[in-house]
Amino acid sequence: MTRERADWQAIADSLVPRTQAFINGAFVDARDGRTSTTIDPATGKVLANVAECGDAEVDSAVLAARTSFESGVWSRASSDTRKATLSKLSELIMANLDELAVTDSLDMGKLVTEAAAIDVPGSAMILQFYAEAIDKLAGEIPVTPPGSVALVRRVPLGVVGAVIPWNYPLEMAIWKLAPALAAGNSVVLKPAEQSPLSALRLAELAAEAGLPDGVLNVVPGRGETVGKAIGMHPDIDVLTFTGSTEVGKKFMSYSGASNLKQVWLECGGKSANLVFADIEDLNEAAEFAARAIFFNQGEVCSANSRLLVQREIAAEFIAAVVAQAKAIKVGHPFDPESTMGPLVDRGHADRVEQYLGDGAALGSVAAGGRRLTIEGSDCYIEPTVITGLPFDSAPATEEIFGPVLSVIEFDTEDEAIAIAHNSEYALAASVWTSNISRAHRVSDRLHVGTVSVNTVDALGVTTPFGGFKGSGFGRDLSLHAFEKFTGLKTTWIRY
Ligand code: NAD
């Protein structure tokens, strides 16, 4: 069913956001009653006042998680029970699709149609994948001396702390929760301060699905307080983080300064899209190149924010990408005509605007380049293409996390690979060529977590997602995600 703006607005108007922390199966205020606002970037209006947790709430949430874990109510529940509960949660997500899509759109500005078509069904599907995987994992019986048998099993680790960003609020929560809960852990989740609402609703749906009290706790609040308290907590066993490289480094030091909890990081990126002159269809490649940076306002960790194009076709290719950028309609995320919404908040728009200035000074702006005010909100940035940038300049190497594409021309394969590697990050890369040898040769040499060939940003629940270098080292999605949330345990029996 195609919905009009008024239809989405009606859903938004009927929303009653959950604003309290969710601890031990109940919604509770922060102990000192403190709240902070979450703002709709499309209008600048306050959406809700949300409990601003602190150390006390983190302590309560960890205690609830620990108690539930030790009780065995979830950690030792049968695989059938866990599968049924997580499947039920997946169904409830789909049953509340519109509400969840509107919630994330309001909280961080993404197009509501994309949240409804991608984020929410994707979350339900990922949860279902892990629910189904629970009883497909088996242990090992390695060879041991006669008169003995050793059983090697994957066991849950205990209390998982999960700290997530705002670009895919519901989906990032699910990427962490689904494998962590499927494996039998209890979780304390901190959503980003910009986008706490869908995680709180998710906790309520999880309770409705039958997840026992204390198994999932959600503590909204600021990174420097709640995030740090989770990172430093002596009774959290594993920390899973998605966010910036800068904050990822902090979690490593929190762990070292506290209990040596395992830390798994999914951090930033500055992914390169290498387009060779032998591509089969220039217009298709240009369309993908534009989508790879402008989708979700460019607020995607694996966005292909550097376009490396071979000189012979550069002029034609850039013109095609510029045409794509100019065709994007920036506007209110509920408007069906809009193909790009606002950035998450004014602070982030300020930061991206700074890069627009730097880019214009160092290169030339081929499309966009301006911050826009739409319906009273100045969180909008035009889809921007900057050419002629030195490959090692700040806009061409730093993660902008907005709709800004840096274009760099190259002559040879070696040069393209060297430029692609000139980054502190190593999350993803794309390669466009019709030469199969080149496709293999270049993708073999690119040192990144995922190489997409003749497509961009390829990603699926069955394949691991994550990076190398400053992009971190955890892997979300696929059965490999269980490696983060389980430990190998050996039981050696002499007989
Ligand atoms: P961020 O690092 O600022 O915040 C992420 C989370 O960390 C938030 O919940 C925040 O409150 C918390 N935090 C902030 N400061 C903290 C501190 N001092 N101690 C503890 N916790 C703290 O990132 P962001 O701005 O929310 O999101 C954008 C970043 O996320 C980008 O760098 C992007 O590349 C990255 N990202 C990575 C992936 C991936 O899978 N690799 C996916 C999405 C986003």
Image: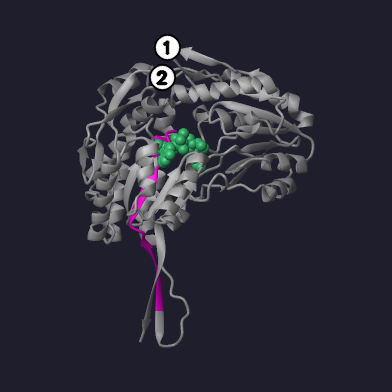
Q: Which mark is residue 375?
A: 1
Which badge, 2 or 1, comes first in the chain's sequence? 2
Residue 361: give x, y in percent of width and height: 67, 20
Residue 55: give x, y in percent of width and height: 30, 42
Residue 23: give x, y in percent of width and height: 24, 43
What's under tag 2, amino acid-wise?
A: Ala
Say which residue appears at 42% left-offset and 32% top-offset: 117
Q: Is residue 188 visible?
A: yes
Figure label count = 2
| The residue stretch that appears in magenta | 150-172
Q: Which mark is residue 42?
A: 2
Residue 241: give x, y in percent of width and height: 44, 45
What's under tag 1, amino acid-wise?
A: Glu
Q: Secondary structure at mark 1?
A: loop
Q: Is residue 153 magenta?
A: yes
Tell me how far mark 2 sits from mark 1, CA to CA: 8 Å
Q: Secondary structure at mark 2?
A: loop
Relative vertical location of residue 277 with respect to residue 471 in this rendering, above or below: above
> Which quadrant of the rendered structure holds the N terminus?
top left
Q: Which quarter of the figure has residue 457?
A: top right
Q: Which mark is residue 73?
A: none
Q: Is residue 137 visible?
A: no
Label 2 neighbourhood size at 10 Å, few (<14), some (14-19), many (20+)? many
Say which residue appears at 65% left-offset and 19% top-offset: 360
Pointer 2 and pointer 1: residues touching (CB < 8 Å)? Answer: yes
Q: Give the farthest residue toward the front.
A: 257
Say which residue appears at 38% left-offset and 18% top-offset: 44
